[in-house]
Amino acid sequence: MFLEFFESKGHLALPSFSLVPHNDNSLLLINSGMAPLKPYFTGQEIPPRRRVTTCQKCIRTGDIENIGKTARHGTFFEMLGNFSFGDYFKTEAIHWSWEFLTQVVGLDPERLYPSVYLDDDQAFEIWNKEIGVPAEKIFRFGKEDNFWEHGAGPCGPCSEIYYDRGEKYGCGKPDCTVGCECDRFIEVWNNVFTQFNNDGKGNYTELEQKNIDTGMGLERLAVVVQDVDSLFTVDTNKALLDAVCHLADTKYQADDKKDISLRIVTDHIKSCTFMISDGIMPSNEGRGYVLRRLLRRAARHGRILGIKGLFLADLSKIVINLSKDGYPELEEKQAMILKVLTEEEEKFNRTIDQGLAILAEMEEDMRSKNETVLSGENTFKLYDTYGFPVDLTKEILEEKSFSIDEEGFKECMNQQKQKARAARKTTNYMGADVTVYQSIDPELTTEFVGYDHLIHDSKITVLTTETEITEALTDGQAGTILVEETPFYATMGGQQGDKGLIVSANGQFQVEDTIKLQGGKVGHVGKMVKGMLQTGETVTLKVCQTNRQATGKNHSATHLLQKALRIVLGEHVEQAGSYVDADRLRFDFTHFSAMTPEEISQVEHIVNEEIRASLPVETQIMTLDEAKKTGAMALFGEKYGDTVRVVKMGDFSVELCGGTHVSNTSTISAFKILSESGIAAGVRRIEALTADGLMKHYQEAEKELHQAAAAAKTTPAELKKKVEAMLEEIKALQSENEKLKSKMAKDSLGDVMNQVQEVNGVKVLAAKVDGVDMNGLRNLGDQLKDKLEEGVILLASVQDGKVSLMATATDGAQKQGAHAGNLIKAVAGLVGGGGGGRPNMAQAGGKNPAGVEEALKKAVQVISEQVK
């Protein structure tokens, strides 16, 4: 109703953007309808129309601690918005919001109460004089409530609309009215009038282009229209909540404590499902960490509710069924969503069990020290290292009359946050890295003509150095060139940008990289090799053909590889990233275990078969819907326009792709996987080579083989046999060496049995032997033990200026109190070292040979104390 209403007012309805922000470092996740439209508000990009309307999926986790505790808070919501980029302003925005709520939705005008910013007389007049709302029903609020700003940048006053839900939702106080904290008056609409620019120091100037940014929570409006108590009892959310109740074998609103867990599971599984559908994977940082936290909270509260076994994937199916009409990507990515949820839930169950064991050790330690408070450091360690939720640590300890040091824990958290903050990049209002490119006229664009041409003439529109826009670049200067039309492919979708030359009669510029800039611009980055180039000059752009062709072979091979992986491993395989240049290819994909050698071999075989089949590579431009009907695979996080490019390789592979390719798979020549490894939870990586890159690899391997054969004085064909013979010889020599070392040690020691002393009925032998390593001392100790039968032996050896000590005690001597480890500890200091060990055997090293005699003497004294 909302989108159709605003389409009737000349707005372009755009589909919801991905939850992953595009070119915006200031946000982890899209958290408002306005967030993905920032470039249009700031003028960085030209909007497709000056009036736009959206229903945007959003996630907010700022108040995650309140989720579940109240029926008002949720992390996932849908924001309805109508936006004007320098077109209409306050009058139309206010009139249309009133028209939609009263005439389209049918809300009672008597129950609607507008609010305006304290000083916004213009908005007050529109509500009062034009709409006809009595002055006493219009509320003026201060900056905190009715002025929207976010640091420096565009900002302005707001006008909100509240709905009176009736006394049954109120607090009963006589002064209860709009602005009261209770649930009676609920804000359903917020008109933001962006009319000022804040310089970041509190100085406001009027904007030339005034904008409208309207937001209305879809769930909030549904709460009002359906007359239910909260967003959890709106029909769609209620269906999901009922499923959670069924799994937990409980009823909603029968037990306050259980209700908290029911709401948390309901809310979080919805957020998780949508996040994974946009390609966000669980990890320990950034948006992946937000996902992991939500997922683990849901799993943990499922445990609290007594839900047995894995349950998140089952609930996710319900989310997908409820929302797939509005968000078809949920159904398209269902196999992967369910797989990620199951894997992560299994992993968390193991984490919980591991965390419980470590917490039990910490409890034991607290008991032994008569402590009742778990340190902030240990609480943080459980949370940060083992992923163990703090509320769970707290809950378990409370059951045993222990508590946690919350202040200490917060301090550890703050230290971690400060480290993270220090590592962040400088960002401007847009949240993107501040660069010279921000100053380029947003009206400028670049047309890519490189599918059909590798050489093309075009006019220079912008030149920049590394820090500013310039009129000319001269010999030796580094910079960026923008032109009207380019054959150079800009780095995108994992394919690295083209290299080449930009030349004119006056100068030559070496293109080292080609990059995509905001607003459809392409930057050719590099340096002037000679002469000078000026803005407005017509130049010839020459793409390096060898580099482009080699990159195309590797890119086309990734398409064959993705299809082969889905055949061998299953339909859950999705591309999670790629890197393609002239030398090699790298392909990241979703899969949850290491590939077996057989699977790798099978994938390699399929790809090479399709290369030999000489499949024609065809490209077609079509609508996204038409492309999906062909079965073309789309990429996560990719913004697709009205039309898309479909790359088809025979009947084998069909993918949406803007990159460059070979014209026939036979051009790829051959394909070889070099490695397969894990790079993140549920994400694997394949590195591979094709064509010339593969030949180069084999040439290098062959060279190494010949060098190894020459070093072994044989031929490559006989190398294996020669290496085996050499290993046998080494083994025999080592054995011989050990025997000789043992004999030398024995000879060096001489007959020491006459040095045996008896201490309190225990035989003690403390002797020095020269030039024997620790291994030799241990062998000597074993031989002397046989001769001694029962007793204690301490041997000391000096080799290369360093001392080795070894002590051993027989079972009989140990029974009488002898302890080799304590003996070594007591005497090691005298030789300038340290060590220890078990009662039967111990060793130490030292740097003071002069202390050996004293150590041997002290040994007798130590043993006399041990065996009293």
Image: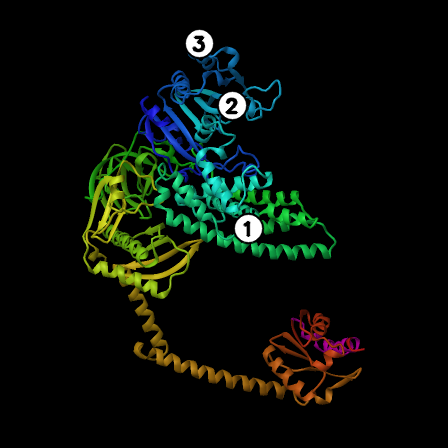
Residue 54, compared with residue 645, is above or below; it is above
Specify which label sits upstream in the sequence, 1 or 3.
3
Disc marking residue 387: 1
Residue that label 2 marks = 165
- Percent position (x, y) of residue 333? 36, 46
Which amino acid type is shown beneath numbered disc 2?
Arg
Residue 594, compared with residue 154, is above or below; it is below
Q: Nearer the viewer, mark 2 or mark 3?
A: 2
| Left or right: 401 in relation to 686 | right
Distance between the Cα atoms at labels 1 and 3? 58 Å
Q: Quadrant of residue 811?
A: bottom right
Which amino acid type is shown beneath numbered disc 3?
Lys
Q: Are marks 1 and 2 in contact (CB under 8 Å)?
A: no
Q: Quadrant of residue 254?
A: top right
Q: Badge 2, how many Cα within 10 Å: few under 14, some, many 20+?
A: many
Which amino acid type is shown beneath numbered disc 1?
Gly
Q: What residue span does the magenta drawing correspond to? A: 846-865
Q: Is residue 857 magenta?
A: yes
Q: Is residue 318 magenta?
A: no
Q: Who is closer to the viewer here, 418 or 165?
A: 165
Q: Residue 637: in sight, yes or no?
A: no
Q: Nearer the viewer, mark 1 or mark 3?
A: 3
Q: Residue 754: in sight, yes or no?
A: yes
Distance between the Cα atoms at labels 2 and 3? 26 Å
Quadrant (top left, top right, bottom left, bottom right) of the N terminus: top left
Instruction: Please tell me whether mark 3 sits on a helix, a strand or a loop.
Output: helix
Q: Are marks 2 and 3 in contact (CB under 8 Å)?
A: no
Instruction: Please tell me whether mark 2 sits on a helix, a strand or a loop.
Output: loop
Q: Nearer the viewer, mark 1 or mark 2?
A: 2
| Left or right: 660 in relation to 36 | left
